[in-house]
Amino acid sequence: MTPGVGAAQWFAAARPRTLPAAIIPVAVGVAVARSTGHVVAWHAALALIVSLAMQIGANFANDYSDGVRGTDAERVGPTRLVATGLASPGAVRFAAIASFGVGAAAGLVLAVVVSPWLIAVGAACIAAAWLYTGGPRPYGYAGYGELFVFVFFGLVAVCGTTYVTSGELPATGWLAAIPVGLLAVALLVANNLRDIATDAAAGKRTLAVRLGDRATRACYTALVVVALLASADVAPWRHFAPLGLLAAPVAAVPLRRVWSRAEGGALVPVLALTGVVQIAFGLAFAFGVAL
Protein backbone atom coordinates (compact mmCIF):
# COMPACT_ATOMS: atom_id res chain seq x y z
CA MET A 1 0.00 0.00 0.00
CA THR A 2 1.06 3.59 -0.55
CA PRO A 3 2.08 5.32 2.69
CA GLY A 4 -0.79 7.44 3.99
CA VAL A 5 -3.45 5.50 2.10
CA GLY A 6 -5.51 3.26 4.36
CA ALA A 7 -7.17 -0.04 3.59
CA ALA A 8 -10.57 1.66 3.63
CA GLN A 9 -9.50 4.03 0.84
CA TRP A 10 -8.16 1.18 -1.29
CA PHE A 11 -11.38 -0.73 -0.68
CA ALA A 12 -13.45 2.28 -1.75
CA ALA A 13 -11.27 2.67 -4.86
CA ALA A 14 -12.10 -0.92 -5.81
CA ARG A 15 -15.68 0.39 -6.08
CA PRO A 16 -17.58 -2.34 -4.24
CA ARG A 17 -20.91 -0.97 -5.49
CA THR A 18 -20.02 -2.27 -8.95
CA LEU A 19 -19.23 -5.80 -7.80
CA PRO A 20 -22.77 -7.15 -8.29
CA ALA A 21 -22.00 -6.81 -12.01
CA ALA A 22 -19.30 -9.45 -11.47
CA ILE A 23 -21.14 -11.74 -9.05
CA ILE A 24 -24.59 -12.02 -10.62
CA PRO A 25 -23.42 -13.26 -14.06
CA VAL A 26 -21.62 -16.13 -12.35
CA ALA A 27 -24.68 -16.99 -10.25
CA VAL A 28 -26.90 -17.03 -13.34
CA GLY A 29 -24.31 -18.98 -15.34
CA VAL A 30 -24.13 -21.62 -12.62
CA ALA A 31 -27.94 -21.79 -12.54
CA VAL A 32 -28.01 -22.45 -16.29
CA ALA A 33 -25.28 -25.06 -15.85
CA ARG A 34 -27.32 -26.76 -13.15
CA SER A 35 -30.20 -27.08 -15.60
CA THR A 36 -27.93 -29.28 -17.73
CA GLY A 37 -27.59 -31.67 -14.81
CA HIS A 38 -23.83 -31.26 -14.38
CA VAL A 39 -21.96 -28.62 -12.34
CA VAL A 40 -18.31 -28.71 -11.29
CA ALA A 41 -18.31 -26.63 -8.10
CA TRP A 42 -14.62 -25.72 -8.04
CA HIS A 43 -14.83 -24.54 -11.64
CA ALA A 44 -17.65 -22.21 -10.55
CA ALA A 45 -15.49 -20.90 -7.69
CA LEU A 46 -12.65 -20.13 -10.10
CA ALA A 47 -15.10 -18.43 -12.47
CA LEU A 48 -16.20 -16.17 -9.62
CA ILE A 49 -12.58 -15.30 -8.82
CA VAL A 50 -11.96 -14.44 -12.47
CA SER A 51 -15.07 -12.25 -12.65
CA LEU A 52 -14.37 -10.35 -9.42
CA ALA A 53 -10.69 -9.86 -10.25
CA MET A 54 -11.51 -8.50 -13.69
CA GLN A 55 -14.09 -6.08 -12.29
CA ILE A 56 -11.75 -4.81 -9.57
CA GLY A 57 -8.87 -4.60 -12.04
CA ALA A 58 -11.03 -2.59 -14.43
CA ASN A 59 -11.96 -0.20 -11.62
CA PHE A 60 -8.33 0.39 -10.65
CA ALA A 61 -7.36 0.73 -14.33
CA ASN A 62 -10.10 3.32 -14.75
CA ASP A 63 -8.84 5.20 -11.67
CA TYR A 64 -5.30 5.15 -13.05
CA SER A 65 -6.07 6.12 -16.65
CA ASP A 66 -8.54 8.88 -15.80
CA GLY A 67 -6.16 10.19 -13.16
CA VAL A 68 -3.11 10.47 -15.40
CA ARG A 69 -5.22 12.04 -18.17
CA GLY A 70 -6.58 14.61 -15.75
CA THR A 71 -10.20 13.81 -16.61
CA ASP A 72 -11.10 13.11 -12.97
CA ALA A 73 -10.05 16.51 -11.68
CA GLU A 74 -13.69 17.46 -11.02
CA ARG A 75 -15.88 14.62 -9.74
CA VAL A 76 -19.19 14.20 -8.00
CA GLY A 77 -18.82 10.46 -7.45
CA PRO A 78 -16.60 8.39 -5.17
CA THR A 79 -13.07 9.63 -4.53
CA ARG A 80 -10.39 8.47 -6.96
CA LEU A 81 -6.90 7.71 -5.69
CA VAL A 82 -4.81 9.13 -8.53
CA ALA A 83 -6.90 12.23 -9.23
CA THR A 84 -6.84 13.28 -5.56
CA GLY A 85 -3.18 12.42 -5.03
CA LEU A 86 -4.00 9.89 -2.32
CA ALA A 87 -1.93 7.27 -4.15
CA SER A 88 0.68 7.47 -6.88
CA PRO A 89 -0.25 6.48 -10.43
CA GLY A 90 2.30 3.67 -10.24
CA ALA A 91 0.70 2.20 -7.13
CA VAL A 92 -2.79 2.23 -8.64
CA ARG A 93 -1.49 0.81 -11.92
CA PHE A 94 0.17 -2.00 -9.95
CA ALA A 95 -3.14 -2.68 -8.15
CA ALA A 96 -4.87 -2.99 -11.53
CA ILE A 97 -2.19 -5.29 -12.93
CA ALA A 98 -2.19 -7.41 -9.77
CA SER A 99 -5.97 -7.80 -9.96
CA PHE A 100 -5.77 -8.81 -13.60
CA GLY A 101 -2.99 -11.22 -12.64
CA VAL A 102 -5.19 -12.95 -10.07
CA GLY A 103 -7.96 -13.28 -12.64
CA ALA A 104 -5.54 -14.52 -15.29
CA ALA A 105 -4.12 -17.16 -12.94
CA ALA A 106 -7.57 -18.52 -12.08
CA GLY A 107 -8.56 -18.36 -15.74
CA LEU A 108 -5.42 -20.23 -16.78
CA VAL A 109 -6.35 -23.13 -14.52
CA LEU A 110 -9.78 -23.26 -16.16
CA ALA A 111 -8.16 -23.10 -19.59
CA VAL A 112 -5.96 -26.09 -18.75
CA VAL A 113 -8.82 -28.25 -17.47
CA VAL A 114 -11.63 -27.06 -19.78
CA SER A 115 -10.38 -25.53 -23.04
CA PRO A 116 -7.31 -23.57 -24.21
CA TRP A 117 -9.64 -21.21 -26.08
CA LEU A 118 -10.41 -19.64 -22.70
CA ILE A 119 -6.95 -18.02 -22.83
CA ALA A 120 -8.05 -15.92 -25.79
CA VAL A 121 -11.30 -15.01 -24.04
CA GLY A 122 -9.39 -13.96 -20.92
CA ALA A 123 -6.95 -11.85 -22.93
CA ALA A 124 -9.88 -10.11 -24.63
CA CYS A 125 -11.45 -9.39 -21.22
CA ILE A 126 -8.25 -7.82 -19.88
CA ALA A 127 -7.76 -5.77 -23.05
CA ALA A 128 -11.35 -4.51 -22.92
CA ALA A 129 -11.00 -3.59 -19.24
CA TRP A 130 -7.76 -1.67 -19.79
CA LEU A 131 -8.76 0.09 -23.00
CA TYR A 132 -12.05 1.36 -21.57
CA THR A 133 -10.23 4.48 -20.39
CA GLY A 134 -6.63 3.49 -21.21
CA GLY A 135 -4.57 3.46 -24.36
CA PRO A 136 -4.36 6.13 -27.07
CA ARG A 137 -8.06 5.96 -27.99
CA PRO A 138 -10.15 4.81 -24.98
CA TYR A 139 -13.48 3.53 -26.22
CA GLY A 140 -15.23 4.61 -23.02
CA TYR A 141 -14.56 8.22 -24.00
CA ALA A 142 -16.21 7.66 -27.39
CA GLY A 143 -19.55 6.30 -26.18
CA TYR A 144 -18.95 2.57 -26.72
CA GLY A 145 -18.63 1.53 -23.09
CA GLU A 146 -22.19 0.24 -22.87
CA LEU A 147 -21.70 -2.14 -25.79
CA PHE A 148 -18.58 -3.67 -24.27
CA VAL A 149 -20.21 -3.97 -20.84
CA PHE A 150 -23.14 -5.86 -22.36
CA VAL A 151 -20.78 -8.21 -24.19
CA PHE A 152 -18.33 -8.92 -21.37
CA PHE A 153 -20.51 -8.62 -18.25
CA GLY A 154 -23.49 -10.23 -19.95
CA LEU A 155 -22.77 -12.64 -22.78
CA VAL A 156 -19.18 -13.58 -21.94
CA ALA A 157 -19.62 -13.78 -18.17
CA VAL A 158 -22.85 -15.80 -18.13
CA CYS A 159 -22.10 -18.06 -21.09
CA GLY A 160 -18.48 -18.49 -20.03
CA THR A 161 -19.51 -19.53 -16.54
CA THR A 162 -22.07 -21.98 -17.89
CA TYR A 163 -19.50 -23.54 -20.18
CA VAL A 164 -16.65 -23.89 -17.68
CA THR A 165 -18.91 -25.33 -14.97
CA SER A 166 -20.84 -27.81 -17.12
CA GLY A 167 -18.88 -28.30 -20.32
CA GLU A 168 -22.00 -27.32 -22.25
CA LEU A 169 -23.55 -24.10 -23.54
CA PRO A 170 -27.29 -24.48 -24.12
CA ALA A 171 -29.39 -21.82 -25.83
CA THR A 172 -30.79 -20.86 -22.43
CA GLY A 173 -27.33 -19.59 -21.51
CA TRP A 174 -27.43 -16.96 -24.27
CA LEU A 175 -30.99 -15.96 -23.38
CA ALA A 176 -30.23 -15.74 -19.66
CA ALA A 177 -27.24 -13.52 -20.42
CA ILE A 178 -29.41 -10.82 -22.00
CA PRO A 179 -31.13 -9.42 -18.86
CA VAL A 180 -27.90 -9.77 -16.89
CA GLY A 181 -26.02 -7.76 -19.50
CA LEU A 182 -28.75 -5.11 -19.67
CA LEU A 183 -28.61 -4.51 -15.92
CA ALA A 184 -24.81 -4.26 -16.07
CA VAL A 185 -25.24 -1.60 -18.75
CA ALA A 186 -27.81 0.16 -16.55
CA LEU A 187 -25.16 0.38 -13.83
CA LEU A 188 -22.80 2.14 -16.23
CA VAL A 189 -25.55 4.43 -17.52
CA ALA A 190 -26.42 5.42 -13.94
CA ASN A 191 -22.77 6.28 -13.34
CA ASN A 192 -22.50 8.31 -16.54
CA LEU A 193 -25.82 10.08 -16.00
CA ARG A 194 -24.43 11.41 -12.75
CA ASP A 195 -21.25 12.57 -14.49
CA ILE A 196 -22.70 14.18 -17.64
CA ALA A 197 -21.59 17.71 -16.76
CA THR A 198 -18.10 16.81 -15.57
CA ASP A 199 -17.50 14.31 -18.38
CA ALA A 200 -18.56 16.84 -21.01
CA ALA A 201 -16.22 19.43 -19.51
CA ALA A 202 -13.36 16.91 -19.56
CA GLY A 203 -13.99 15.98 -23.19
CA LYS A 204 -15.37 12.51 -22.45
CA ARG A 205 -18.04 11.76 -25.04
CA THR A 206 -19.81 8.98 -23.15
CA LEU A 207 -23.15 7.72 -24.39
CA ALA A 208 -24.82 9.84 -21.68
CA VAL A 209 -23.04 12.96 -22.91
CA ARG A 210 -24.04 12.18 -26.49
CA LEU A 211 -27.69 11.49 -25.61
CA GLY A 212 -28.15 14.31 -23.15
CA ASP A 213 -29.77 14.29 -19.72
CA ARG A 214 -33.39 13.42 -20.47
CA ALA A 215 -32.65 10.77 -23.09
CA THR A 216 -30.14 9.14 -20.75
CA ARG A 217 -32.79 8.89 -18.04
CA ALA A 218 -35.10 7.26 -20.58
CA CYS A 219 -32.29 4.91 -21.61
CA TYR A 220 -31.71 3.87 -18.00
CA THR A 221 -35.42 3.23 -17.54
CA ALA A 222 -35.63 1.13 -20.71
CA LEU A 223 -32.63 -0.95 -19.70
CA VAL A 224 -34.06 -1.79 -16.28
CA VAL A 225 -37.60 -2.48 -17.52
CA VAL A 226 -36.51 -4.58 -20.52
CA ALA A 227 -34.07 -6.54 -18.32
CA LEU A 228 -36.87 -7.49 -15.94
CA LEU A 229 -39.20 -8.47 -18.78
CA ALA A 230 -36.46 -10.40 -20.58
CA SER A 231 -36.43 -12.95 -17.78
CA ALA A 232 -39.59 -14.31 -19.38
CA ASP A 233 -37.64 -15.20 -22.54
CA VAL A 234 -36.19 -18.20 -20.73
CA ALA A 235 -39.61 -19.38 -19.49
CA PRO A 236 -40.30 -21.82 -22.36
CA TRP A 237 -37.29 -23.87 -21.20
CA ARG A 238 -37.05 -22.94 -17.52
CA HIS A 239 -40.60 -22.27 -16.35
CA PHE A 240 -39.69 -20.42 -13.16
CA ALA A 241 -37.25 -17.96 -14.79
CA PRO A 242 -39.82 -15.11 -14.60
CA LEU A 243 -39.24 -15.08 -10.83
CA GLY A 244 -36.82 -12.34 -11.80
CA LEU A 245 -39.87 -10.06 -12.06
CA LEU A 246 -40.07 -10.16 -8.26
CA ALA A 247 -37.32 -7.52 -8.36
CA ALA A 248 -39.72 -4.97 -9.90
CA PRO A 249 -40.58 -3.24 -6.58
CA VAL A 250 -36.85 -2.93 -5.85
CA ALA A 251 -36.24 -1.45 -9.30
CA ALA A 252 -38.94 1.15 -8.73
CA VAL A 253 -36.75 2.87 -6.12
CA PRO A 254 -33.86 3.98 -8.37
CA LEU A 255 -36.30 4.64 -11.23
CA ARG A 256 -38.19 7.13 -9.07
CA ARG A 257 -34.94 8.87 -8.13
CA VAL A 258 -33.81 9.02 -11.76
CA TRP A 259 -37.06 10.79 -12.69
CA SER A 260 -37.05 13.08 -9.63
CA ARG A 261 -34.95 15.70 -11.47
CA ALA A 262 -31.98 14.84 -9.27
CA GLU A 263 -28.66 15.89 -10.78
CA GLY A 264 -24.95 15.45 -10.09
CA GLY A 265 -24.24 14.37 -6.54
CA ALA A 266 -27.93 13.75 -5.86
CA LEU A 267 -27.71 10.85 -8.33
CA VAL A 268 -24.90 9.10 -6.44
CA PRO A 269 -27.34 6.76 -4.60
CA VAL A 270 -28.71 5.53 -7.94
CA LEU A 271 -25.49 3.60 -8.56
CA ALA A 272 -25.80 1.71 -5.27
CA LEU A 273 -29.54 1.18 -5.77
CA THR A 274 -28.93 -0.23 -9.24
CA GLY A 275 -26.50 -2.68 -7.66
CA VAL A 276 -29.26 -3.72 -5.27
CA VAL A 277 -31.57 -4.27 -8.25
CA GLN A 278 -28.89 -6.43 -9.87
CA ILE A 279 -28.63 -8.55 -6.74
CA ALA A 280 -32.39 -8.88 -6.21
CA PHE A 281 -33.06 -9.70 -9.84
CA GLY A 282 -30.03 -11.93 -10.26
CA LEU A 283 -30.76 -14.10 -7.24
CA ALA A 284 -34.46 -14.47 -8.05
CA PHE A 285 -33.73 -15.12 -11.71
CA ALA A 286 -30.95 -17.60 -10.98
CA PHE A 287 -33.16 -19.45 -8.51
CA GLY A 288 -35.95 -19.64 -11.08
CA VAL A 289 -33.58 -20.88 -13.80
CA ALA A 290 -32.12 -23.51 -11.49
CA LEU A 291 -35.48 -24.92 -10.42
Image (spheres, rainbow, N blue to C red):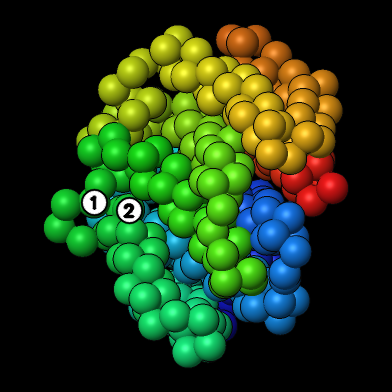
Residue 51, picture quadrant: bottom right
Can the viewer see residue 88 in this picture?
no
What amino acid is labelled 1 in the image? Pro
Relative horizontal placement of residue 156, taking residue 53 as reference (left or right): left
Residue 228, picture quadrant: top right
Can the viewer see residue 62 in this picture?
yes
Extreme residue toward the left, this view: 136
x, y percent for residue 58: 45, 62
- Please give the name of the residue rendered at 37% of the width and 47% of the height, measured from the top-left corner: 148
Q: Secondary structure at mark 2?
A: loop
Q: Secondary structure at mark 1?
A: loop
- Please give the name of the residue rendered at 48% of the width and 32% of the height, measured from the top-left corner: 189
Mark 2, residues whose alpha carbon is within 10 Å: few (<14), some, or many (≥20)? many
Q: Please tell me whether residue 276 is drawn above or below residue 256 in the rendered image.
A: below
Mark 2 → mark 1, Cα distance in angstroms: 5 Å
Relative horizontal placement of residue 237, taking residue 191 as reference (left or right): right
x, y percent for residue 134: 27, 59
Q: Are marks 2 and 1 in contact (CB under 8 Å)?
A: yes
Relative horizontal placement of residue 46, taking residue 279 as reference (left or right): left
Q: Please tell me whether residue 215 is drawn above or below residue 158 in the rendered image.
A: above
- Please give the name of the residue rendered at 54% of the width and 25% of the height, measured from the top-left corner: 223
x, y percent for residue 281: 74, 37
**Nearest to N terminus: mark 2 or mark 1:** 2
Residue for badge 1: 138
x, y percent for residue 179: 59, 36
Q: Which mark is residue 132?
A: 2
What amino acid is labelled 2 in the image? Tyr
